[in-house]
Amino acid sequence: MREKIRIILCCIFLAIAIYAAYNIIKIQSEYKKSVDAYKKLDNYTIEQTTSETSGESEEEPVKEKPYPEVDFAGLKSVNSDVIGWIYVPDTEINYPIVHTSDNDYYLDHLVDRTQNPAGAIFLDTRNPSDFSDLHSIIYGHHMKNGSMFAALKGYKKQDFFDGHKTGYLITQDAAYSIDFFAGHVANVEENAWQLDFDSAEDFSNWIKSLKDISAFKSDIEPQYGDRIFTLSTCSYEFDDARFVLSGKLTKIE
């Protein structure tokens, strides 16, 4: 009888191990598919440079711009929902941004519309696609392989912020710097995702509330009329925790 129980238990443990191994392989496969899919989209970006004539030589020295040039026509041939590109130097954040009529579809679909748990970086459906709101929000998953918005966890530390103060938003018509000024772990019930402001005072109080609880200190002091750009992802300090990183948009080209 004991031998029979031992055999049954062994079979149960083996089944559990096989199931766990299957899930691990499946997850790793999904990770690879998403990484490969986004790697292909790199073909639609190139390192951008601008020429500066010295006046002393026929040669024109070049100065690299801090953000990529994006082939939006090519990207839109892959998916017409593409509206921009988000880039944070020296991190994995270097992705197209999409926009659609709901906030669910791109939770589990890549930019090429392949179903995948990595999803895509997408603009809140409440925002206009030209980023003209006072506050625009983009969402991305915190992937365990470091992709998508996993790098945002670095902004929980002052030293990481000190080395990564600026990101870039590139659209078909312009390029913007994103000067980060606040980031914190938020509960979904907070006003970190507020879009409408009744007055300049309401806006200023909102900015102050973000800076007061920020995980890092910044000299950036947005004023009413400035456009705010927030990156939002999951965090794991408690149920439904999110990490939100906010910056001020400034047109640079």
Image (tube, rainbow, N blue to C red):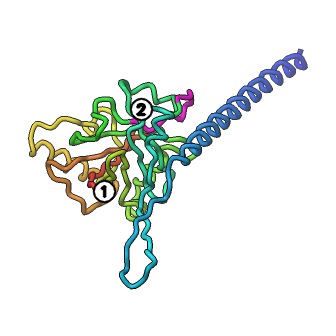
Q: Which mark identifies residue 230?
A: none
Query: Looking at the picture, how far across and down is residue 217, in whole percent?
Result: 29, 60
User: Does 42 appear above or below 117?
Assistant: below
Residues shaded magenta: 113-122
Q: Secondary structure at mark 1?
A: loop
Q: Secondary structure at mark 2?
A: loop
User: Does 250 appear above or below 72?
Assistant: below
Report if residue 252 lies within the magenta region: no
82 or 247, nearer to the observer: 82
Q: For the residue marked with disc 2, what is the amino acid?
A: Asp
Identify the residue position indicated by label 1 in the image.
253
What is the CA distance from the residue labelled 1 to the residue labelled 2?
23 Å
For the C terminus, give its image quadrant.
Answer: bottom left
Residue at the extreme bottom of the image, as rendered: 56
Main SS, magenta region, reads: loop
175 or 116, nearer to the observer: 175
User: Residue at coordinates 53% horizontally, 41% vertically from top-left?
Assistant: 143
The quadrant holding residue 167 is bottom left
Q: Is residue 106 left or right of residue 228?
A: right
User: Residue at coordinates 27% horizontally, 51% vertically from top-left?
Assistant: 249
Q: Is residue 127 left or right of residue 110?
A: left
User: Residue at coordinates 45% horizontally, 36% vertically from top-left?
Assistant: 76
Question: Alpha-carbon neighbours of circle 2 within 10 Å: few (<14), some, or many (≥20)?
Answer: some
Residue at the extreme front of the image, as rendered: 58
Identify the residue position indicated by label 2 in the image.
81
User: Which numbered disc, 1 or 2, marks the residue that appears first in the sequence?
Assistant: 2
Question: Alpha-carbon neighbours of circle 1 within 10 Å: few (<14), some, or many (≥20)?
Answer: few
For the N terminus, give its image quadrant.
Answer: top right
